[in-house]
Amino acid sequence: MLIGLLTFQLSFSQDNYISGYVIKSSADTLLGFINYKDKEVNPKYVQFKMRIDDNPIVLNTNDINEFSVGGDIYVKGVVEIENSPIKTERLEENNRVNLKIDTVFLQTLFRGEKSLFFYKNQYGREYFYIEQNNKFELLIYKRYYKRGDNKRLIAENNRYLSQLSLYLNDCEKIKSRLRNTTYKKNSLIRLFKYYYQNSSFDALFQKEKKKVKTEIGILSGVSLTSLNFTSKHSFEYLSEAEYDPSVNFSAGLFIDVILPRNHERWSINNEVLFSTYKFTGSYKEYKNESNYTNTITKICYSYIRINNMIRYKYPVGNMFVYVNAGISNAFSVDETNYKRVESKFYSEDRIDEDLAMTHVRKHEQGYIIGAGVKYNKLSLEIRYEGANGMSEHKGLTSSVKRYFFMLGYKF
């Protein structure tokens, strides 16, 4: 039911309107609500509402010069785009840039005496711009092949470094930083931060880097475990025995690492759990009332489990619905691996005790899928896990299936 509800929400409720503004081509500023997608690719248009209950209107670079939402500022720019191939196998054998003109929304990284802008197209290619005389200047960078010693070498046209050296020349210390500045977003942001820290100017706007958040809490609940053995020969006392599901307590800690983009809906969920199960089975080989064997097995294991999952959550009213999937690695901390054979051969009765399995693994591996709901600091989840069990015999395969019903509390 939870997965179905989440699917419905994802299909029909992708909008995320939050407060923002647009500056129209006429220079009028409109306050309202913008559908904030929070994606890495620069938007081609925005969906805007004056009031939250209004129908949205679509605005593009023909309609507005600037908009701001979610801590981001985008400005309209008539800019040069460099179109040389960037895949290594398709690089050109010259350092000439291939430019075309386009009108796009640029993301503002710094605004002030010296400004820096960013554009990422739908193919994932990144461009950076500075502003001079109310015009946007592309920082030039190109990878290309050059000939050397009868082979092709990859070289770089790093004209952006000389452009930045000239643009930031009122800061004497900047040249020493340029040597280590690459054509990457974080590297250029560090350079401009250094400029404003060591010049007489203050940045009017600086895009804040979204930080990874963590949530820590406890989990407790119950597990419902089923055990199954498969064997072609020799282990009928295990493979033919019936084991009733084992219901046991489980508890532990979680650390949810929340990724900053996409409205913090994706996270990496990590857990350390204690779980256990207990099984008793019997198998009877009966020839007649004076000749039979009854084998009783007890299989009990306790584990420390390390679970690592990818989680996606989605707001539904004042709570979140989420799904997650990942892997489980469990390490045995206690075991009961016992077999009792009660046999009768006419007048002779005999009892033998031994290990049920002589080859067992201490490390169990499995996969996890689950769904749940979060409300404030509480969460409730149902989870399925399939694992390879404890048998390492070549002729005996074990499989363990578990359902967890877990209640979580975030500190």
Image (tube, rainbow, N blue to C red):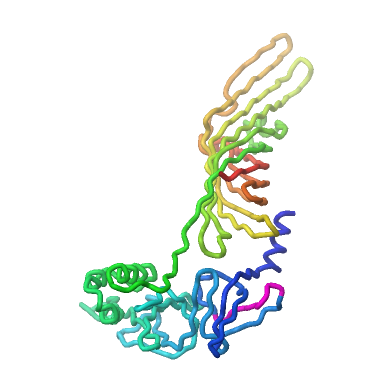
> How many labels sit on residues?
0
Q: Residue furthest right?
A: 289
Q: Quadrant of residue 278?
A: top right
Q: Is residue 285 visible?
A: yes
Extent of the magenta region: 44-53
Residue 163: give x, y in percent of width and height: 29, 82
Left or right: residue 182 versus residue 343 is left
Q: Is residue 145 visible?
A: no
Residue 319: give x, y in percent of width and height: 67, 55
Left or right: residue 99 versus residue 94 is right
> Camera-side residue: 35 or 333?
35
Q: Residue at x 31, y 84 (%)?
A: 93
Q: Quadrant of residue 318?
A: bottom right
Image quadrant holding the N terminus, namely bottom right
Left or right: residue 331 versus residue 162 is right
Q: Residue at x 52, y 47 (%)?
A: 255
Q: Is residue 205 magenta?
A: no
Q: Residue at x 72, y 9 (%)?
A: 347
218 is higher (above) or lower (below) than 334 = below
Q: Is residue 47 magenta?
A: yes
Q: Quadrant of residue 390?
A: top right
Residue 222: give x, y in percent of width and height: 67, 37
Image quadrant holding the C terminus, namely top right
Residue 296: give x, y in percent of width and height: 68, 23
Q: Residue at x 69, y 33 (%)?
A: 247
387 is higher (above) or lower (below) than 323 = above
Q: Residue furthest top?
A: 347
151 is higher (above) or lower (below) than 371 = below
